[in-house]
Image (cartoon, helix red, strand yellow):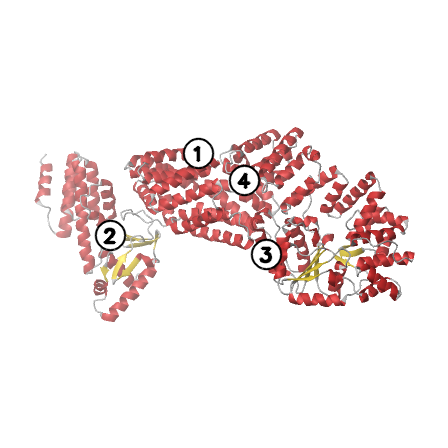
Amino acid sequence: MSNITNKPRIPAKLSQPRLFNVIDRHRLFALLDEERANRSVVWIASPPGAGKTALVASYIKARGIPAIWYQVDSDDNDAASFFYYLGLAGRKAAGRKQLELPLLTPEYLTDLSGFARRFFRKLFASLPENIIIIMDNYQEVIAESTLHAIVLAALQELPVDIALLIISRTDPPPCFARAVANNLIGKIDWEYLRLTLEETRALVAVNHQMCDEMIIQSLQDRTNGWAAGVVLTMDYYMRTGILDSASKPASMELIFGYFAGQIFQHLQEDMRIFLMRTANLPYMTLKMAAEISGVPRAKELLDYLYRQQLFIDRRTSGEMSYRYHALFREFLLEQTNSHFSTRELHDMQRLGAILMESNGDSETAAELYAKAQAWSDLIRLINSYAPILLVQGRHQLLQRWIGLLPEVMIKSTSWLFYWRGVSCILFNIHAARSDLEHAYTGFLAADDSAGLFLVCGAMMEAYLYAEDNITPIIKWGERLQELLEHYGDFPSFDVEVRVFTNLLGLIFAAPHHPLLEILEARFESVLRSIADPSLRVAAVCTFIFLPLWRGDTGKMRRIINEVGPLVNKATMPPLLRILWKNIECGYAWHIAASPHVAEQKLGDAIQIAQESGISILNGMLWAHGAYSALSAGNIVAAQDYLDQLESNLGMQRKHDLTESHYIRAGIEFLRADYSRAFDNASTALKLHEETGRPFLRETCRFGLAQILIEMGKTEMARNHLDVAIQYAHAMNNPMLEHQCLLVKAFSWLKEGDERRALVSLQEGLIIGRKNNFLFLNNWWRPHVMTRIFTCAFQFGIEIEHVRNLIKHHDIKPESYDIENWPWPIKVYTLGRFDLLCNDAPLHFSRKAQHKPLELLKCLCAYRGRAVNQNLLTDALWPDSGGDAAEQAFRTTLHRLRKLLKYEQAIRLEDRHLFFDSNYIWVDCIAFDRIAHLPDLTDSVLLKRTLNWYHGRFLDGETSYWAVASRDRLRASYVGLVKRSGAMLEQNNNWSDAAACYLGAIEVEPLVEIFYQHLMNCYIQLGRHSEAITVYQRCRHILLSRLGISPGQEIQRIYQSLTTI
């Protein structure tokens, strides 16, 4: 296959006629001025040869009006071709303005009228003022063509300073009836276009010597003002002196043929041959005319015909070209067919095709190759241009070219099957698959590796977008893997890139497929080698689902950083920009766990879709919006997205129905309607099994397991989780395994089986830490994560990783007794006064912040719960009253909140001050809460609580509120030590009991009972000398600090030791 560049050219169909010796028809110029003043569209309709083209060409020249001249032909029945060529014309007319007009590619076909409106808005906004767009030969548009609707869309968008002139042999078709009835379209028909006597006189005078008035009157009568008839009759008269040698035929076409034949007979032989040979070309440059005619003096002959006005016009669009009038060319082709043999005709037509192809006119070349039955040339042309036509969205034109070939030629050429199959994937999927199957068989027989690889990719794409069950894609993935093993590599880089862009079907049908692992290993290097930005983005939008689903943060970040800047360029097609924003949305909620960013990216994607009119991705965007909302626990947003999904898609495809059920299951689950959630999740799982999308199936299974846990069916839930974990191993998906393990741990915690919960929890958190996972669950329930992470803290499992997760998700604690929880603010008052903000010490000038810190200490002393403002002002500003105290309090509170950096940490409600336990943790408050729990028997909790007490509360603070709290907390500490020690002693755990009392003595050395119990523990352990040392230490401290001796009980114990 040859490589054809997609460099735009200005073809002959966009060139403007340059007519010779054309009369200015001021009567019609004035009519055109009037029609343009009142309407933006003027329809000029009359029989051929009435001077329509000459009128418009002379009008825009006389008025000096800029124009786009668009020559309509049969190719314009393909809307994609029409927009392609009109886009070329628009860019040329826009001049220095950078005009990028979209191609009508398949993603726009669901809303052709919308695409047309947006296309014309952009085009008209960039064109010069007062420009006229001329559509010539509109009769070439067939009745069922979509071009009629497109032109009507243009009519609606036309601004007042731009006019559309349509030249046709026929009146406006019926679909224009409303526009005509509403007086939106002005008409100039045959009654206006027929020459008046004065115009006939002027036409004769401009081309011939002055003629007798009777001759002119006779011409007018005989031709009825038909311009072509006047020219032909007068030319015949000048050659023969005979005004009329035949009876009048019944139609203008027959009149034209009669007189043209008479004139043709009187031409020299070389001129007749020249005319017949060149008539094979719809237009010609001087070089083309010379080559096809074999006449070196082609320029001389063309100039003669042009000056004689023998139905030829001259146009300039770069190189000068000539074009015969349609009627005259039809006449010449009839002469050609009767004069030359079939072999000679075919040779001329093939030569004409070669000339057209070399001039860049592949459309005309294809038609001429077909007429010449030059099938090998046509096949070569198709193979060369097919990739470009597909990129341009001109699928119908490609199908028409292939349809020019005999079926036997198609059946014997595998590439034709391939191109025809690819071109109709979106229009006739069954025919496409049949053609691609035939292509594969042919390529296999011919050992054509490129064709084999491309068919595999195309078949995967064909099944993904057209079928409910995409399981057959796996077969084509296996064939692709066999090809790689057989050939060792792709046949070319271009084929490799094309296959990469087709792999989405296999990724959905079998993300565990070993071929994907092979290709993923080379994906990033392939990606960096793709020069075309659009192709590069397209490849990413396909293959990135694997690292996205697996949670491969590093790979996702690298790809986004490398490719993201390309997407922001204005030249990037809207479809790819939508897909890219959708990927960024997926990264935000599934990798970065940032639902607000995901919402923003999704909003960008939806906006691009709305502005561009691309609606085929709406279902995917709404579904992803719902997923993102559910992962944030936002039921309202998820319901809104689901409503849009269901109301706009109609739920006709199983995949759409599956997503609807799964999203609804998530919504009902978060609403705690577990019965409905179960029904929807079960249906979704069944449909996923039927549609053959295993990763989505296991994601759904994961959701169903969570529902079953809440329904009390934990064993069934764990069975589902085990199946999902097994598949996660198969597709190397640590993220899915991580999520399943955390939920499995939660199921054991629900049953009170802490031991088994810890096994699953540790496995899951290790996976999460190794992969730096932030995303936790598709259906966000904070209390579940709180329960799981509390357990992790209690048993010291992956503490730093868990702390990072809590901070990222802002998860609130279920209990105040977890010091390791990443509270935004921590206050230590027992044995020290320290203030931490996000685990970092808060540095401040104590003098400058004395009063705010005093307020904080006072709140701690009053346990931070509903502390009356009056109580605080009395304590801190005893000498102030009324407004002064109020103002001092407000100012100090403001300064304290500013110091803490979290204003919400301290709330003021109804003149009562509170610590918000979601933001601030205070050691004395946590200690006090545990100390006052009734029947506290949890030895682990007791030990952790005692460890918080590092010394007396705000030691050194002499205020009455501090002293009172200090005494209360000290008493609580003594009570907790006694309780903990007693529990240990009852279990004969004398070593731990001794450690408990020894630790207590370190922080409260004046509590005699601690020494007494410690001595008893040492006695039970047989460590009598250490028991004696304890007594001596107790006696020394009590005497030195309090001036008292130990009590009778401890002395009795001591004496018993000394008498042993």
Report x, y in % for residue 726. 42, 33
Q: Nearer the viewer, mark 1 or mark 2?
A: 1
Label 3–label 4 contact, CB within 8 A:
no
Disc 4: CA contacts within 10 A as few (<14), some (14-19) or many (>=20) = some
Q: Amino acid at mark 1?
A: Tyr
**Of the residues shown, which amino acid type is indicated by label 3?**
Arg
* Sequence-wise first label, 4 or 1: 4
| Mark number, residue 117 | 3
Query: Spatial distance from mark 3 to mark 2, Cα to Cα?
Result: 68 Å
Q: Secondary structure at mark 1?
A: helix
Quarter of the image with the C terminus in it: top left
Q: Amino acid at mark 2?
A: Ile
Task: Return the disc, 1 or 3, that comes first in the chain's sequence.
Answer: 3
Please tell me which of labels 1 and 2 falls first in the chain. 1
Is the Cβ of the residue at disc 2 closer than 8 Å to that at disc 4? no
Give the labeled residue for mark 4. 466
- Determine whether the residue tagged by mark 4 lies in a helix, strand or loop: helix
679 vs 880, left or right, is right
In this rendering, the label closer to the viewer, 3 or 2? 3
Measured in 3D between alpha carbons, the distance from the residue under mark 4 to the one under mark 1, in whole angstroms, is: 26 Å
Q: Nearer the viewer, mark 2 or mark 4?
A: 4
Q: Label 2 near label 3: C-beta < 8 Å?
A: no
**Under tag 2, what secondary structure?**
helix
Residue ID for mark 1: 727
Residue 925 disc label: 2
Question: Which numbered disc flags the more N-terminal residue, 2 or 4?
Answer: 4
